[in-house]
Image (spheres, coloured by chain):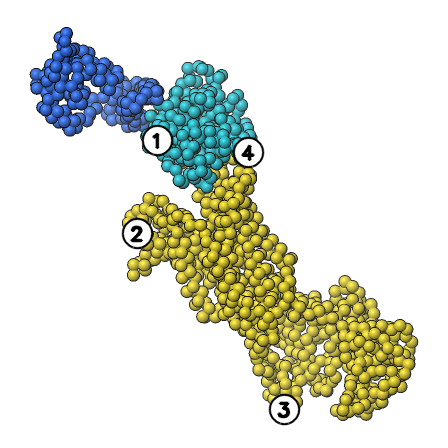
Chain colours: A cyan, B blue, C yellow
Amino acid sequence: MTPAGSLLLAKDLRKSYGSTPALDGAEFSIHPGEVVAVMGPSGSGKSTLLHCLAGIVTPDSGSILYNGRELSSMKDAERSALRRSEFGFVFQFGQLVPELTCTENVALPLRLTGVRRKEAERTALSWMERLEVEDLGNKRPGEVSGGQGQRVAVARSLVTSPRVVFADEPTGALDSLNGERVMQLLTEAARSTNAAVVLVTHEARVAAYSDREVVVRDGKSRDMMLEHSV
Amino acid sequence: MSIGHTLLGLLESGPRHGYDLKRAFDEKFGHDRPLHYGQVYSTMSRLLKNGLVEVDGVEAGGGPERKRYAITEAGITDVEAWLKQPEKPEPYLQSTLYTKVVLALLTGRSAGDLLDTQRAEHLRLMRILTDRKRRGDLSDQLICDHALFHLEADLRWLELTAARLDQLATEVRA
Amino acid sequence: MNRLRDLTLGARFALTGGREGWTRTLMTAIGVGLGVALLLATTALPGALSARDARDNARNDYGAGQETPAAADTMLIARTDTVFGGDDVRGRLVQPEGDRAPVPPGLSALPAPGTMVVSPELRDLLKSPGGKLLRERVPYKITGTIGDAGLLGPHELAYYAGSDSLKGHKTLSSNRIDIERIKTFPDKKPGEPIDPILALLIVIIFVVLLLPVAVFIAAAVRFGGDRRDKRLAALRLVGADSRMTRWIAAGEALAGSLLGLGLGTVFFLIARQYVGEVTIARLNVFPSDLNPSVALALLVGVAVPAAAVGVTLFALRGVVIEPLGVVRTSVPRPRRLWWRLLLPVVGLGLLIPMFDKGRDTGFYNQTQVIGGTVLLLIGVTALLPWLIETVVRRLGGGGVGWQLAVRRLQLNSGAAARLVNGIAVAVAGAIALQMLFSGIEGDYVKSSGEDTARAQLVVPMSSNLSKAEQERREENLKAVPGVTGTTTLGNVGLHTPNPDDQKYVEMAVGDCRALREVGELPSCKDGDVFVAAGGEFGGDGAAPGAKLLFESAWVGDRKGPETPYTVPRDARTVQARPDPLGTKRGGLLATPGAVRKFTKISVYYTTYVTTRPGDGTAADRVLNAAWRDDPFTRARALNDVKTATKFSGVRRGLYIGAAAVLMLIGTSLLVSMLEQLRERKRLLSSLVAFGTRRTTLSWSVLWQTAVPVTLGLTLASGVGLGLGAVLLRMVGRPIHIDWPSVAGMVGIGGAVVLLVTALSLPPLWRLMRPDGLRTE
């Protein structure tokens, strides 16, 4: 694998919040179907790296190429559209919309891209089956357990058949058994659709579900894949 | 692991032949390393000598593998005592890795690199185990998990040490 | 004792609970403060009005004692009230008849002849260039200022001028300003029974304005409730039981409301300073008159904190606070309809027995009125949660924004209902009031019948004027710039000769052009006499050939001889026509030639003046010209509608009051919306991560407010119209729906929603920035 085949390729990213540097020269690459763990102690800049890669945050400098296109030169609306259709997201605390049912939560990204309700919910249900939470369809997030909720969140991240799934500490709020199950389902589902997964975690056992890891320390990261190819 | 106690425990459910014992052992606990027949017979004769098992019968044809063993009352007591006794926790005080780190610091080599390499190696093994866990059954998962947790503990130590390398450097050089 | 301890503990949390606790307490305090200020203002209003009445009574000079003989303690007084530029000017000419003559309040001594004391506002007006025309009518030298005791409000226009010519005019005719002799101020017992319908109106206004304020205060003490609940959960963790946490919460609300009482008093005192500058419905009061009655102020002081505690305990009734930071609403029961319907039904039951009492039987049981109205309006707050829950449960379909809003409402329709309740009550009450207003407007806003298309001013002349003097004065009026024409009609009284069955007969005297103003003449030449048919009065004894007597003229203090008059046999009968003042005269219409030979009769001349349209000052110039010829003239401008401006002022006041209340409630809507948004910061950020558009979430915010508000306004319109209909029936008026005012109120309610949404969008967009995703 070479950087040329990378789906997402970031070089020399820098980003500060106020006077605090969050990223100070980070690099990253990922290929289609690959699961890459972003590791590092808390506060090292893992989440910021993920936010930059997903086009949620614009870095102060550096380049991020997605499919050959420079993310930072895109307009906000374009990046939003990209996130809607090509990216999926899983967060630490699920961040399911509490008033929507689980099915509606899963269908939400599809609905945002303009898919009609019925169809979106049908697709949502098939993903919920794959994640073994189809029974929760009519429940609200407040009525399901943390592990179930996180599986619903994973289903939601995959429902648009994204090319990249960004998972930020997806097991952070779960016990290890539930966490393992979520990781297993996430990586299997992603592999089956050839989606790449950017997995931010500080847990080695979660990272072990990845194909390789990129370590962030003090806002700096080295991607071995890039080094080898140079 | 005490092979004697394990074989005794297997006998508790009923008398078995020697080769039965070996097969049962391999199936449940042997994963990486199957028992040698010799090991089984030497252990059984020791147990016989100590009165923990007795020969229940011998099949025609003779030979040690034809003997059928049964556990004695003393044997049952012995298994029970073994199960009751907690295993001594491993103190892990003699760590090669620690030695390496300190030496790297003393000799002015990059301890950080050393830790990074080690981490990559640990993760590589963890990936293999995770993969095997994914394919295997419950016993596979439990065994792999045991190993994974240990490796994770090592990794945490690596992280912690990496975060305190500067402090350590000033101490060992003082 | 324990409760007291928990309450004080809660109060301490409210004041020392760090920045967050402080913000919450302050929000509550400001909200309660605004409400309390409004409450104090309304409770002070009756006092202010009665203080105004007292001032009015203290200077009253409408006595019955005209027959009092002149003495050392009497004085002659002439009421020279006028209107300048649409504003009333209260004027009095005074002439003491001895050294113990009474001095009106606000004056230290009576002004000397040719001088006057004026109100500060009139002084400023007369000194300004804008007051030049008025100065011509009030030319006296200013020697002093009327003190506050002699004025109704700081902006009243008033003067007392000294005169030495009143004595000679004492017995002038009724066409001129009255001159009376009085002994004291006040010259009449104060206090005249208040019109029961007006009393009803005032009661309803109070209920309608105060009820939403109460609802608002109830909402204000719940500001920041969700975060508070989390804090309470932490208290449970360290061992407080659930009863204790409730009382602690009540203590927090109590602290906020007490602080709010203080703030409210301050707000009220500040606002009171400016009340003198405001004139609503010609009502202008002194700040010092705006004093809440002690009893009502005490009631506010007790009721508000008590309500704060009560509301909090009531609100926490359905909430289970668990130690582990979990706050669950106990199994939500579907809302039942029957007891919610009970409130308005009982309210109606209280009001219906008072149907058709009209103003004849005269009085309404106030308790019953207040009870019925309050129950009906409270019924809105009881029905609305049920209505919202029921409707929202059935909603579906639509885009993502709609879905988010609907689902949120389904999950917590109670919160939405709480917020909209205030708006609904205010709108319902205001609609009912507007309906009642327009229904009884006919009683208070009478068309005066005066036709301003035919004449703009009327100048009555004194009797005993020679024809030449009358013509000279008419020429003077014609010469005034801006005057386009004059018409003069004379008036002579006759009666039938039989003393036992005397009938009064009017005779209008004027040229053919003038007579056409009062009768439909087919043809006319000088010397003609007509009999007017269909007149309102004075036509009974008039017929061709009838023998009549002219009313004798007063000569000095005695009646003159009665001159006989025979109506010509050839007098034609014509249809009477209303004159420019709206009166349909009956009797005789005579051209000057027909009565020229009767020189002894006295004719009251009245000149109608038309002015150039759009000339705003012509009227004042005409009044000045009339004044120059006769300082006691009753010349005045014509008015299509009497008291119309006054009444529209009250309605305008109601609009302003309702808008203020709605704004107040809008702020609480906004606060809770912002609070909700802040609470969902991370969720919002995650939605942005998915690529959710701003517009989607903005729509969801709009729907989330608009749906309950629409339901609330619909219910409010229904209840408001119902209450309005009931009130109209109570005063015995036909039910008539005043759609523009319904639309106006609903429009204001809708505008509040839009405003709240618009104001919550910038914070929403700020929260939608990805910073919210950062966990550290």
Residue extending furthest front? B60
- The answer to whether mark 4 and mark 1 are in CB contact below 8 A is no
Q: In this orientation, which residue lies closer to the viewer: C130 or C652?
A: C652
Residue C70 percent location from the top left of the image: 65, 90
- Secondary structure at numbered mark 4: loop
Distance in Å between CA atoms under marks 3 and 2: 84 Å
Percent of width and height locating residue B68: 14, 15
In the shown orientation, is residue C120 left or right of residue C395? right
Instruction: Answer with the quarter of the image where residue C324 lies.
Output: top left
SS type, badge 3: loop
Q: Mark 1 sits on what residue? A: A178
Looking at the picture, which amino acid does disc 3 mark? Ala
Task: Report helix, strand or loop for mark 2.
Answer: loop
- First in sequence, mark 3 or 2: give its number: 3
Tag on residue C241? 2
Q: Chain of mark 1?
A: A
Amino acid carrying mark 2 in the image? Asp
